[in-house]
Image (tube, rainbow, N blue to C red):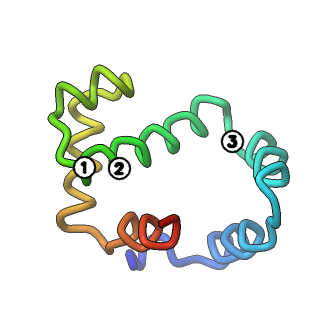
Amino acid sequence: MNPKIKTEAVDELFDAILKLETREECYTFFEDLCTINEILSLSQRLDVAKMLRDKKTYMEIAEKTGASTATISRVNRSLSYGNDGYEMIFNRLG
């Protein structure tokens, strides 16, 4: 975990997210918390990570998701050298 983000405010944000119980509650909360573009960017990164995990090429990923090669590269770096957060979620999603 990056100590730069470990703050009381971030702890409270994550605690709030952990209290969400349904997809509808997530939509309600995140639409208030984030801009539409921020939500779409986060979902795009998850989609990119899934495709990288499935060994899709940067070109295939860019065409399907609209992600830039810079975004794809950043997600790929997180998959390779990050904290395994994507992998944890993929395992839980099945």
Left or right: residue 19 compared with residue 73: right
Determine which residue is flagged by label 2.
50
Classify 76 as above or below 72: below
In the image, is residue 42 above or below residue 23? above
Q: Nearer the viewer, mark 2 or mark 3?
A: 2
Question: Is 54 located above or below residue 3 in the figure?
Answer: above
Which of the two labelled residues, at mark 3 and mark 1, occupies the earlier sequence position?
3
Q: Is residue 46 left or right of residue 38?
A: left
Give left or right: position of 15 versus 94: right
- The amino acid type of the residue labelled 2 equals Lys
Q: Position of residue 54 (x, y in %)?
A: 24, 49
* Residue, far front: 94
Q: Mark 3 points at which residue?
A: 34
- Where is the N terminus found, in terms of image quarters? bottom left
Q: Element at badge 1?
A: loop
Q: Would you identify the image quadrant in which residue 84 lies?
A: bottom left
Q: Name the residue under label 1.
A: 54
